[in-house]
Amino acid sequence: MLKNLLIFSHPVVRDSSSAAGNSRSGEHRSDQADLPDRWKRNAQRIGVWMEKHRLIPDQVRCAPTLMSRTAAEKACKSAGLNEDIVRDDVRISRYTGSLVSELLAEMGSESTCMLLAVDAKVALEICRQVAGVRHNDPEVASLNTSDRLLHIETSVRETEGTASKVAVCGHLQESLDPSSLPKLFPYPDVFGSEQRPRPAYYYRQSAVIPFRYCDDELEVLVVSTSKGKRWVVPKGIHDPGKSAQESAANEAMEEAGVLGNVIDVEVGRYTHDKWGATCTVAVYPMEVTEVLDDDQWPESHRKREWLCVDAAADRVHQHELQGIIRSLPEMLGEHSSGESKPHGRGE
């Protein structure tokens, strides 16, 4: 049985700040160092490459470090996968000779591709054990200084008398330098002809208009932007693998500190320019059921304010959004008997 093993390798990060009292400066590995921006882009380019080549992982494991998790999540989302597919696995950071066999045994007969996000030390050991690659071979010689995607095709067989599987051999099919991939990303999908500075999903966004009834009057919640210069409604990237409503409800919790029921009716769309192109935002109403205290509100540096519909429309700066907010009372009247979808904590 053939299984595809994809390894996204990044150099081992040393935390110089933790070595202040150590005679061997830099010997401490940092588990909380994040992926540098250029490597984040490389991880996203790898995700596009995986989707184009139909090497879509059905299982994703990463070392329990922020850098490895970020690399895995960035690659997965650019390949159209939900980031929830990524799982921390402490065995990866404690590499043993049985690691690959254990991982492949857990894949199941229907799984064909696994992605591992690891540092260079672990990647080298896997390549040596599974594919017979030596540390000084050109395919892996640069792992200690740059990120890379390694594609190993493994042959797996069941061990007699057990349900476990063992990787009996493997071949390094490709050692891909992500910096060799196109700098721009295809749009509207991986086969699109337009090129943009960020992955295609960045430009598909969703928002909610949080509302409530106070003394029978319809009110809308608006929030300030991060820098406090303008007023908006909660919005963000429509994350791959989630519905537009789910993504927007999460933004409402983070940006406005509110939970509620998102009505499954798109009330309009508006556009705005960001990342060198135009983003399209789908807008949904959300009836607020809970307002979080500041200590539970992730972005409590923002301001929030309940306003009547016309005042809320006047407050936001996007002209298209103003019209959508003004149409809210009519929409709620037309769909008062429609179903709504709960999202958020406590629902």
Image (spheres, grey):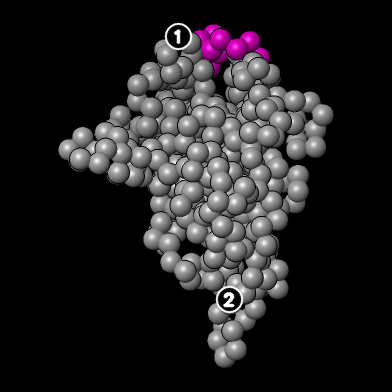
Query: Residue 143: x, y in percent?
Result: 53, 45
- Residue 105 at what x, y percent from top left? 56, 73
Of the two numbered discs 1 and 2 in the rendering, the one whose residue sits closer to the viewer:
2
| 33 vs 116: above or below | above
The residue located at (45%, 59%) in the rendering is: 92
Per the image, the residue denoted by label 1 is: 229
Q: Is-magenta flag for residue 272?
A: no
The answer to whether one can see residue 235 in this image is yes
What residue is rendered at 63% in x and 33% in y? 179
Q: Secondary structure beneath disc 1?
A: loop
The quadrant holding residue 198 is: top right
Q: Nearer the viewer, residue 114 or 240?
A: 114
Seen as rendered, the residue at the extreme front is: 136
Residue 203, horizontal then vertical, whole percent: 66, 27
User: What kind of residue is marked 2?
Assistant: Val
Closer to the chain start, of discs 1 and 2, is 2
- x%, y% of residue 100? 53, 66
Q: Which region shows up in magenta?
A: 307-320
**Position of 140 relative to 168 (above/below):** above
Quadrant containing the N terminus is bottom right
| Amino acid found under the numbered disc labelled 1 | Lys
Report, in whole angstroms, how far the alpha carbon at label 1 lies from the one at label 2.
Answer: 59 Å
Q: Is residue 308 left or right of residue 111?
A: left
Residue toward you, 178 or 53: 178
- The residue tagged 2 is 166
